[in-house]
Image (cartoon, rainbow, N blue to C red):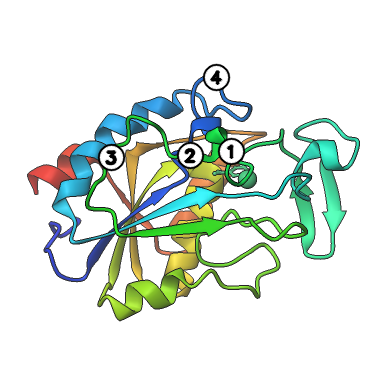
Amino acid sequence: MIEPVSGAGDALVIVDVQTDFCQGGPLAVPDGDAVVPLINRLAPAFPVLAVTQDWHTPAHVSFASSHGKQPFETVELAYGTQILWPDHCIMGTPGAALHPDLYIPNAQMIVRKGFHPEVDSYSAFLEADTTTHTGLAGYLKERGVTRLFVCGLATDYCVGWTAMDGRKAGFEVVVIEDACRAIDLNGSLDAAWQAMADAGVTRTTTDALLSA
Ligand code: VGL
Ligand code: ZN
């Protein structure tokens, strides 16, 4: 049972609801656009909102094109195995913009991640080298946040890693499951839900939260 959004200590973290991850984009998440109206309903309930943007350099290390490989192949990097993606969310380009129908005027903090050319960052807290912090945990703590509600794209990558790193940073974490969509590559969605459950991340839905 999730306690209702109290107005104190709660934050909504909206992950990577960007043009390139939506319909027609180079890394379109199936049905990704469907999260937009749900997030627009959720946003007014929260006193603290942080929004993330995947924000890569051209020729980023996470791009297949940077390695002469095909999307969804992998390479071994100093920090581990990197899945290679189509070029996406290049900093300052229209594809990196937030979805045009996302209406979240009370959002306060925008966190950009993945901007180091040689390091990916699915998580909104910690880059893939597992040592470089984005600053989001400090921001949320200074705002008095203790519980995070996470939504956006994609459930099995940036949402999942953000949720798990939120736990590691000491927050209670709840994923709003209908306000997320997944890429689901080789069973990655089931694996992500299992890893989140193991980390103590809980789940709710938009309706349950807004009627609580
Ligand atoms: C994401 C793959 C590559 C995400 C970002 O937002 O889930 N996935 N970059
Ligand atoms: Zn990316």
Residue denoted by label 1: 93
Q: Is residue 36 above or below residue 78?
A: above
Mark 1 sits near ligand 2, with its Cβ under 8 Å away: no
x%, y% of residue 209?
Answer: 17, 47
Q: Are marks 1 and 4 in contact (CB under 8 Å)?
A: no
Which residue type does callout 3 highlight?
Answer: Ile
- The quarter in which the N terminus is drawn is bottom left
x%, y% of residue 180?
Answer: 40, 38
Q: Earlier in the sequence, mark 4 or mark 2?
A: 4
Q: Earlier in the sequence, mark 3 or mark 4?
A: 4
Q: Nearer the viewer, residue 120 or 5?
A: 120
Residue shown at the point (28%, 53%) measured from the top left: 107
Residue shown at the point (26%, 38%) measured from the top left: 103
Which residue type does callout 1 highlight?
Answer: Thr
Q: Ligand 1 falls in which quarter?
A: top right
Task: Say the numbered circle drawn on residue 39.
Answer: 3
Task: Say the numbered circle drawn on residue 97.
Answer: 2
Residue 15 horizontal side relative to residue 62, left or right: left
Decide if residue 170 is in sight here.
no
Q: Residue furthest top?
A: 24
Q: Are marks 4 and 2 in contact (CB under 8 Å)?
A: no
Task: Say the numbered circle drawn on residue 35.
Answer: none
x%, y% of residue 93?
Answer: 58, 38
- Mark 3 surroundings within 10 Å by alpha-carbon count, few (fewer than 14), some (14 through 19), many (20 or more): many
Q: Nearer the viewer, mark 1 or mark 3?
A: 1
